[in-house]
Amino acid sequence: MCAMTHPASPELDPELYLPRMASVVAVESMTAREKFFKVELSKPLGHRPGQFVMLSLLGIGEAPISISCGPRHDNILEMVIRNAGSLTRVLHRLQPGARVGIRGPFGSGFHLDDFNGKDVVCIVGGLGLAPLRSLIQPIIAQPQRFGSITIISGCRTPAEELYRDELESWSRMDQDKVSVIRLVDKTANLPWNGKIGLVTAPIPDLKINPARTLVALCGPPVMYKFVLMELKALGIPNSQIFVDLERRMKCGVGQCGHCQINHVYCCQEGPVFRFDRIENLQEALQ
Amino acid sequence: MSIKGGDSVRAFIIRKNAVSDWIKHLARKNSVSFPQRAGHSGFRFKPVLETSEIQFEHYRPTLAPPGKQLTPAREVLFKYRKNATADPMLESVLDSQARVLAGVRPCDLKAIDLMDRVNREGFSNPHYLTRRENTVIIAHDCLQPCDAACFCAATGSLHWRANADVFLTSLDDEILVECLSERGIALAQGDHFTLCENTEPHKKRAEALRTQPFGRQFPVPLEQLPAIIAKQWQSRVWEKHVEHCFSCGSCNMVCPTCYCFNVVDDFNLADGDSGTRTSTWDGCMLPNFSEVAGGHNFRPHPAARQRHRVKRKFEYLSQRFQEPGFCIGCGRCARQCTAQIDIFSIVSDLVSQGENDPCVP
């Protein structure tokens, strides 16, 4: 048979589902449930902040994992992986030298040019720091390109805080450029040098100019509603707020239907959305 | 299969009793599927053999729609073989076998067209499109509704022609054969076929034979449904129609425009080193469909899942692909539902309900 009734797209990739193999070069425990993975690919990933990869082990399975490092010129990819299922349980047992499969990067992500000259507020809850670190890193690395950055990072107890060393080192930087507010819901009798409370608590006291401020949010579904209420009270328009959403995804390429939020495919149009574009989308936030 | 390029002949007449011979003739050289009786439970699209009973027209809609042959229940995406000293061998699996889908009704024809659009969007699906580009479709007109469950006229499917390579219209003891593509022309060859210079009188005759009104009708035109249903988020209708739902997903599995899938790895127990990554059908009515790692479920209630399924057919995909009906009105979901839930009744209720009536959490 020859000519097609319906020509396939010229970009038809017969290997769309084939992962590229990459080496684990470092694994570090971060908390009881999360490990930090540094992986080396055969070429640079070429990602934007906020994008994700499909990470797999042959014979076990594949899952979407946020990219936790800013754009890089080398072949390194960093991820934080929570032990939450069969694939991640096996991943947690890997040692440096292990080989994993990577597809991607996928998703919309953040466009750094949107942040040029802007003051940036990042509000993260729990594991939400992992993806937003990919945005925080390039902003902190180029203070002349961006305005100030404020990081509000909350988690349940001190034992669940991710990237503590980095949060502390960022908090020691030039106070006019970088400020870090670390919170826990409760100390659980552990040593703690941050604040106690929810991530919403510091928002009313932020010294910001709403006109030149962009906000990025990532956290558990319950967090968004309350943070958005506080941001509204501060006078920040929805068009200056970005939310990074989590969904079940099995393909990463807009085909499996799992991540669909109404007519929107989270893996294609998201997972990072400018909030005014999804504010009327039911089921987006909860 | 040969293509006679440049052939301008497009329409023929064939005697009705010659159709079976023609289909079997095609099946000697090609893989041809045609609806055939399967046990006590109705009809299935099955390969045509010399002994097959080709009963043109008079079949109740098959359990699975013909389009599912383009997305099998289990589809191997790639094979792998691990290697002790080097990276694993990975081999993408694409099915480029030539096939003919025959005996396709207009509703299923529309569904295949919609799935073509879905699979071409964004990252094109190489597995679907490879199979699709090697598939030829012989469809036929319906002059009577299949049964009481069908509502294809209401969803704009009854007169669907785009996509067919050959389209058959039944006229008493003969059949009008219209070849709508080069590949269709290549199929309609042989002594059975008499050239038809003017198809119009035949089509008029068929139209006169068609049942009017044709099956169940919605209270408003299809084009108005997306806007009406978009306003229904907290309607009592969602809860009403889900009362007896078992969340079994049967409606998803038999739907010609449900395409969601899961992806699983299978390894070969015999050696432990080889295996496959495979996509398997999944359905949004199943309880854990939208559950994320850690246990949060974005649609924990059956009514919320029902709402998603119905809105997907009449609002979400309509919006995404600029096509008012992604439900094609075949009635399969209602026929197979373990709790007799009928999407036609849900939509009709939503239309008559009008305004929101808070209910669903």
Image (tube, rainbow, N blue to C red):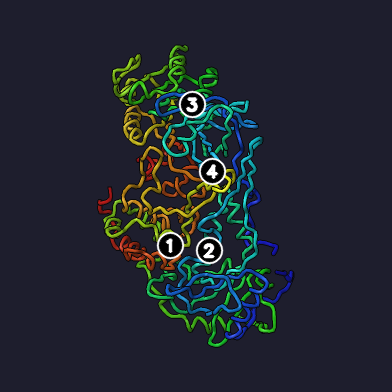
Callout 4, which amino acid? Gly
Q: Nearer the viewer, mark 2 or mark 3?
A: 3
The quarter in which the C terminus of chain A is drawn is top left
Q: Closer to us: mark 4 or mark 1?
A: 4
Which quadrant holds the N terminus of chain A? bottom right
Q: Please, which chain is the residue tagged with disc 3 on?
A: A
Q: Which residue is mark 1?
A: B223
Residue ranking furthest to the bottom: B173
**Residues behind callouts 4 and 3 on a single chain:** yes
The answer to whether the residue labelled 1 contacts the one labelled 2, judged by CB atoms less than 8 Å apart, is: no
Q: Is residue A160 left or right of residue B181?
A: left
**What is the three-letter code of the residue carrying label 3?**
Phe
Q: Which residue is mark 3?
A: A36
Mark 2 vs 3: CB contact within 8 A: no
Q: Residue B38's spot in the image, x, y percent?
A: 48, 73
Label 4 Cα neighbours within 10 Å, binned few <14 / some 14-19 / many ≥20: many
Between the C-alphas of marks 4 and 3, the distance is 23 Å
Assign a secondary structure to mark 2.
Answer: helix
Nearer mark to the viewer, of 3 and 1:
3
Q: CA distance from mark 4 to mark 1?
A: 46 Å
Callout 3 crowding tier (Cα within 10 Å): few <14, some 14–19, many ≥20: many
Q: Which residue is mark 4?
A: A59
Q: Which residue is mark 2?
A: B67
Taking A242 as reference, is B71 left or right?
Answer: right
